[in-house]
Image (tube, rainbow, N blue to C red):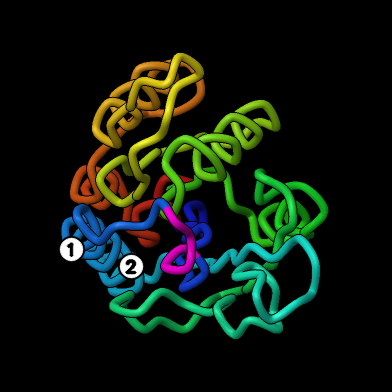
Amino acid sequence: MNTCLIVIDAQESFRHRPYFTDTDLPAYLRAQNALIQGCAARGVPVVRVLHSDGPELPENAFAHMSGHVRPLQGLALFEAAATFTKSRHSALVGTGLDVWLTQNGIHRLIISGIRTEQCCETTTRHASDLGWQVDYALDATLTWDMVQPDGEILSAQDIKTRTATVLHGRFATVTTAQQALARLVPEHLLAQAA
């Protein structure tokens, strides 16, 4: 086993944030689900990462008490090789994910999930700094428009373009979901090469 797909924060909590719109959701789900199903069909482990932080109150969408810290509706069903819950931006901080990856001989990560510029990008940078090779499946990430410090709107597409620009060739290989799948080397070929 050499590669692992990580699905970060693809959870219902986001539907309960004021910035949530479903404008880009269908395209994201198509790419994310194709990636999940493609990895599962190739025997590549799929890891689920959920985010929970803030006060443990029902009105906090990222608290377990809210009932929203669960897979996003429309996400393909999959049997996770492992599930981790994080409370920081990087999925590698305080979760044990780094230990699991090392113990399972994972050298390459495919990063996907929510949000493009936040937890997905942060995990990518962290993983790269720790020595993992990373494919960042840009179309299998989701984000929303943001308000810049000057009050102007930065579109979700511009955020994705910026993320791709700063990651590619430095912290990751930026791919589409289909390109990430095409880059997978079948396990039997890895065994023959060893």
Residue placed most toward the observer, 68 or 191: 68
Residue 26: image tag: 1
| Residue 76 location (% of width, % of height) | 31, 78
**98 or 42: nearer the viewer:** 98
Relative vertical location of residue 57 with respect to residue 42 in this rendering, above or below: below
The part of the image, by quadrant, that contains residue 176 is top left
Q: Position of residue 126 (x, y in %)?
A: 65, 33
Q: Which residues are magenta?
A: 14-18
Work out whether 174 lies above or below 1. above
Q: Which mark is residue 103?
A: none
Q: Amino acid at mark 1?
A: Pro
- In magenta stretch: residue 86: no
Determine which residue is flagged by label 2: 36
Tell me where residue 158 appears, x and y as whole percent.
28, 26
For mark 1, give the secondary structure: helix
Residue drawn at 36 percent across, 84 percent down: 77
